[in-house]
Image (spheres, grey):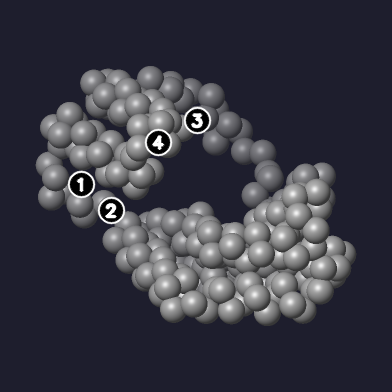
């Protein structure tokens, strides 16, 4: 965090300049003026709380998180009294199609047995050596997460890690391997524009705002 803050101060040093007029304008802002529809604010907060609770309790409710999200979105649309056609225009359709295609590809890899072959090959290559397995998992995860979105990557690699855990001696050594997967996928997702869901969403929002960000 210290290094990151130092880099920000250096990279964006031209933006860190004091301007009397801008400072006065910011100080004159009233937060309540930004609330244009108080009813919609309340309804949105209530639905957000319910959807968050649904995510936490989805195993108890026997509902998939996707169902909770879709139901929450439809309830909010109905309760908001907004024009559905206008709302649909504001949806990040390119981003949704991108993720749909990505999950279809991952599902195909799972169902065709490619993931099982990768798991077996990885387990055989490490031969029960924990250090080799954890380092390989860390760096391979970082490299692949820069190309494939890290969420489906982790979901895809989970059975691979489980297989390696069994090969390297079971649950006693599993923490190192799971942490290697988590750290590699998490940090590797920052390497490219498509490496993480947040990156793709921000690129889409920037594009719609007239600010194209290249790969």
Q: What element carries label 1?
A: helix
Q: In the image, 163: left or right of 90?
A: right
Measured in 3D between alpha carbons, the distance from the residue under mark 2 to the one under mark 4, in whole angstroms, is 25 Å
Give the crowd class for mark 2: few <14, some 14-19, many >=20 residues within 10 Å: few
Q: Is mark 3 on a helix, strand or loop?
A: helix
Measured in 3D between alpha carbons, the distance from the residue under mark 2 to the one under mark 1, in whole angstroms, is 7 Å
Circles 3 and 1, Cβ within 8 Å, touching? The answer is no
Residue 205 on image: x %, y %: 40, 56
Image depth: mark 2 or mark 4 in front: 4
Between 109 and 165, the one lying in front of the other is: 165
The residue that label 2 is drawn on is 91
The numbered dot on residue 25 is 3
Does label 1 or label 4 sit earlier along the sequence? 4
Measured in 3D between alpha carbons, the distance from the residue under mark 3 to the one under mark 4, in whole angstroms, is 45 Å
The residue that label 4 is drawn on is 58
Give the crowd class for mark 3: few <14, some 14-19, many >=20 residues within 10 Å: few
Q: Is mark 2 on a helix, strand or loop?
A: loop
Measured in 3D between alpha carbons, the distance from the residue under mark 3 to the one under mark 2, in whole angstroms, is 32 Å
The residue that label 1 is drawn on is 87
Circles 2 and 1, Cβ within 8 Å, touching? The answer is yes
Between 159 and 74, the one lying in front of the other is: 159
Image depth: mark 3 or mark 4 in front: 4
Residue 130 in sight: yes
């Amino acid at each position: 965090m210290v290094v990151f803050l130092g880099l920000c101060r250096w990279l964006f040093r031209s933006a860190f300049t004091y301007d009397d007029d801008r400072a006065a304008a910011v100080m004159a802002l009233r937060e309540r003026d930004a609330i244009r529809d108080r009813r919609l604010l309340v309804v949105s907060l209530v639905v957000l709380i319910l959807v968050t609770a649904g995510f936490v309790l989805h195993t108890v409710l026997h509902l998939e998180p996707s169902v909770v999200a879709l139901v929450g979105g439809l309830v909010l649309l109905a309760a908001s009294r907004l024009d559905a056609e206008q709302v649909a225009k504001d949806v990040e359709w390119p981003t949704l199609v991108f993720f749909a295609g990505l999950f279809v590809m991952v599902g195909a890899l799972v169902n065709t047995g490619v993931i099982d072959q990768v798991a077996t090959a990885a387990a055989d290559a490490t031969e029960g050596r924990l250090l080799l397995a954890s380092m390989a998992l860390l760096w391979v995860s970082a490299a692949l997460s820069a190309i494939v979105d890290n969420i489906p990557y982790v979901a895809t690699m989970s059975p691979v890690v489980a297989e390696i855990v069994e090969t390297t001696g079971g649950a006693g050594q599993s923490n190192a391997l799971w942490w290697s997967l988590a750290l590699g996928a998490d940090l590797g997702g920052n390497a490219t524009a498509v490496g993480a869901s947040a990156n793709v969403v921000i690129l889409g929002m920037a594009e719609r705002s007239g600010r194209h960000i290249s790969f």
